Amino acid sequence: MLLILINWIYIFISSLSFGFLLKKLFKIDSHNFTIHHILGLISITLFSWCYAFFFALDIVFYGIMSSITIAGLWLFKSDIKTHFTQFKNSWISFSKTYKLGLLFIFIIALAMSSVTPSIFDNESYYIQTIKWLNEYGFVKGLGNLHIFFAQTSSWHILQATFTFPFLESNFNDLNGYFLVIFSFFCVQQLHQYKTSKKINQLYVGSVLVGLPFIIFFINAPSPDLPVFLISQLLFYLFIKHFKEIDYSRFMLILLLTIFLCVIKITTCVLVLLPIILLVKHYSLLKGKLVKPILFSFFVLVLFLMKNVFLTGYLLYPLQILDVLNVDWKVPTALIQLFKVGTYNAAFDYQELANLSTSQLFIAWITSFKFNGIINIIFTTLLISFPFLWYFKSKEKAVFILYVIGVLHFVLAWIFSPQYRFFFFYMLFFAMQICVWFFRKEKTIVFFMAVSLLLSLVPFLTELKLSNYTTIKKTNTKTSLLKFENILQPNVNSSMSPDFEEQIENGFHYNSPTKESYFWTAGNTPLPAVNTKQIDFIKKYYKIVPSLRTEDVGDGFKSVDCE
């Protein structure tokens, strides 16, 4: 926990310094503590992203970033003083209940960040994606080695920035840090609700009621956690500034939207939010659109370049605009394997052939245990929300968010209706309904207190998550906090560190032991891929991965093995 805390301090100082760069560039006048540090994380992500096209995010990179951070601290020293003064004033104004709640969340997040992650995707591609960034940067055709590696969320780029791979311990604690700074925003809004009585402040504050679920995403660099939380901030700002907006607030909403899209491309429908605000307030914003357009174009270019590097396609996993003819292009067969697997995962890998739409829906809501329960709850919220909105709210901005949520679900249904892809809407619907019926701050605080107590469950008992999710072939379970974790965090992989050296068509790679699940690679040294996966694709698709040159850093391509 101590080492995790030191890393959090480093993340805090870096985001503090980098936050001023984005605020000064776009003249954002928000002085909110949490928003400032999110802007700092956006700045760091973009800097790391550009750097990774040319170099590894290794010790040299850390030296450069630390130097920029120190320069920023000196350059913005007067602003930093004001920043801490405002934070201090906010903290002092909180009641003892809120202070204790934040300290509780801080300790829980710190402890959870110190134990071994239990999320399956951590073993299949999170760890390996970050290792590739730390050791090589972006690698051409990496999707040919393991199709999951082609995703490389910007959140993984950001985690690679704070992993410190050259030390004995690799840190996996960005999500824990982010939960803490976002919790401060929630408590701040609840505190202000006492005097403002604005229902949307009560809504965004109530997001912490979802902590017993969110806590399972803390100890792995899962892009889902920032999506769950940042989306609620975005929705809150959209509702708050729907009727009246200025350039600074519009730019903030645009930045958050773009950040969400590059964290998880499945949130791309959220681009409708800044577009709606732009259309509604065009006369006010039309003279100040050069920077927003240039910035949006810049990030789009980064996104397209990343896709091209990793897969050879501009809009991976979509194969539209397939205009490039590079030797590292991922074969269509592998992309189809990825799409089919991702879609079937939403239905607990049931047999879907020849099912009608109604039968598909029944299969979806009757999925294995937890997945089916979440699907039923979301469907209930989706159907009941407009009726409750009509009788309890009638706020236009809220209904627009509902319509966008329906659109998002339709798109998710087409590609893969996994609950993780729409849970943030479920959180929005549930918390809106909650505050419509319970408009008292004390009631929400009571629900939060219960949620905080429930978040202790993973520390009191080991939960075998494979009993509750679709990943039934693995032994995924939560890891208990140990005494030694007070100083040293656990390893970032639940898999055995043992591995086997393999050769396929002259290509040397490392594979986890035979007990490992098909898609997993864990913390195996690079280049790593499961030999079960190699054998399966070789047997059914007649394809094997190969180096483009003798240098691993030059990337991979797929070759026919017939």
Image (cartoon, grey):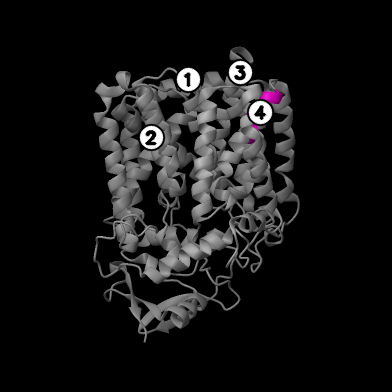
What residue did someone put label 3 on?
193
Task: Give the mark toward the camera: 3 or 4.
Answer: 4
458 is higher (above) or lower (below) than 350: above
Comparing 488 with 282, the one in front is 282
Q: Mark 3 or mark 1: name the one nearer the start of the chain.
A: 1
Q: Mark 1 or mark 2: name the one nearer the start of the chain.
A: 1
What's the residue type where badge 2 is placed?
A: Leu
What residue did someone put label 2 on?
255
Residue 71 placement, left or right of 167: left
Q: Residue sitting at 29 percent across and 56 percent down? A: 321
What's the residue type where badge 3 is placed?
A: Tyr
Q: Secondary structure at mark 2?
A: helix
Q: Residue sitting at 40 percent across and 61 percent down? A: 150
Q: Mark 4 or mark 1: name the one nearer the start of the chain.
A: 1
Disc 2 crowd, CA 10 A, few/some/many (<14, 14-19, 20+): many
Q: Residue sitting at 27 percent across and 34 percent down? A: 293
| Residue that lies at the very extreme toward the bottom in this rendered image | 562
The image shows residue 186 at horizontal and vertical percentages of 58, 29
What residue did someone put label 1 on?
85
Placement of the C terminus among the 4 image quadrants: bottom left
Task: Give the mark toward the camera: 4 or 1.
Answer: 4
Numbered range of the magenta stretch: 430-438
Distance from disc 2 to disc 3, alpha carbons, whole Å, reads 26 Å
547 is higher (above) or lower (below) than 9: below
Distance from disc 1 to disc 2, alpha carbons, whole Å, reads 26 Å
Task: Give the mark toward the camera: 1 or 2.
Answer: 2
| Secondary structure character of the magenta stretch overall | helix
Distance from disc 2 to disc 4, alpha carbons, whole Å, reads 31 Å
